[in-house]
Amino acid sequence: MAGVSVATASKALNERGSMMPQTRERVQAAARALNFRPNAMARALVSQRSFTLGLLTNDTYGRFTLPVAAGLSEAMVDRGVSVFLCAIEDDPERARVNLDAMQEKCVDGLVLAGKRVDRALPLDLSGLSLPVVHVYSARPPGGIGFEPDDEAGAALAVAHLAGLGRRRIAHVTGPVGFAAVPMREAGWRRALAEAGLSPFGEPLSGEWSEDFGFRAAGLLFGPETGPERPDAVFCGNDQIARGLMDALALMGVGVPDDVAVVGFDNWEIFAQATRPALTSVDMALKEVGRQAGLTILDMIDGKRVEPGTRRLPCRLVVRRSCGGAGG
């Protein structure tokens, strides 16, 4: 239909080789008109690639993995690569079975996505010849990992509160056994120091739950606390922040007039449903997934990729809980 050879048509459709721009466009226009789709099995036989990636995760609720998968797929779509997702919970046997299935399908690379940065998936990767990237999970020595920059994200939130004129900024966070907890605390302390402020007491540490946030409000604003109370609270996640705000409403403490509140995660099911809506640190997990995808494509293509963990910037989504104009 385009009036060119098979070789020229192939180069035009794969964006390879040199030819006149008009010729390339004529071939691509003919492909669109014919609704032509390359035969994936034939491509795999010729190139010795399956044009699929495996995505294994123990995050069965998808809180962290779904945005990572969306970013990963976005990076793949223009390269004609599909993503094969398997959820393994924390079951080593189930993980082994799914890893075997991916190897049988000859995936070109493997992305391992977790639900906390300090835990690895229950997988034995010894002897695996595939390129592997770890996302929001622990990586082995010499491995390649991607995760949000928790410390910088926390500092961003606290600097915003300080910029609003808040001077007594408390921190309520999750269990000390999580690596994210000391990183977010470090960001809190760094931003306070840069603003010339002292921490308002020591961080309150407990479960990643609304219940703990509710109880923490009593420790910070209850009748035994005296006249010196926080004028802002930076919470280690959105669930804690929502529980804290529920308790403040019952106590008659106004948000944001009396105290500003910022969460972490930007989990919209919590952030949008709080009253007022919660300002929160977004971990930009979609971008984390996209960057991981681009990196594993480089690895598949044989490019040199330095080992180590890449920490990507977070962003602050401003809503009404700290006086912003957001939803």
Image: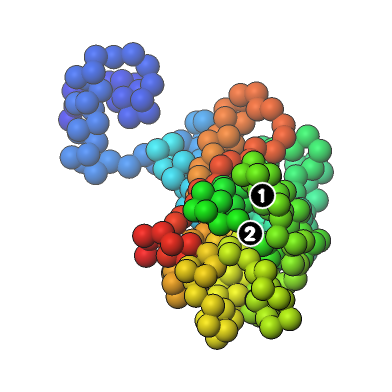
Residue denoted by label 1 = 197
Name which residue type carries label 2.
Ile
Name which residue type carries label 1.
Leu
Q: Residue at x 38, y 21 (%)?
A: 16
Question: Mark 1, residues whose alpha carbon is within 10 Å: few (<14), some, or many (≥20)?
Answer: some
**Is 203 displayed left or right of 57 in the figure?**
right
Q: Residue at x 65, y 44 (%)?
A: 196
- Mark 1 or mark 2, whichever is nearer to me: 1
**Is 15 displayed left or right of 285 in the figure?**
left
Quick check: 219 above or below 279?
A: below
Closer to the camera in the image, 187 or 2? 187
- Spatial CA span between label 1 and label 2: 9 Å
Locate the C terminus and report the quarter of the image it occupies: bottom left
Q: Is residue 160 visible?
A: no
Q: Position of residue 64 (x, y in %)?
A: 58, 59
Q: Position of residue 270 (x, y in %)?
A: 51, 71
Please count the marks in the image.
2
Q: Are marks 1 and 2 in contact (CB under 8 Å)?
A: yes
Q: Point out the tag, 1 or 2, that comes first from the N-terminus.
A: 2
Q: Position of residue 189 (x, y in %)?
A: 70, 49
Locate the N terminus and report the quarter of the image it occupies: top left
Q: Residue at x 42, y 43 (%)?
A: 77
**Residue at far bottom of view:** 250
Q: Is residue 11 visible?
A: yes
Q: Secondary structure at mark 1?
A: loop
Q: Secondary structure at mark 2?
A: strand
Q: Position of residue 169 (x, y in %)?
A: 63, 59
Mark carried by residue 169: 2
Mark carried by residue 311: none
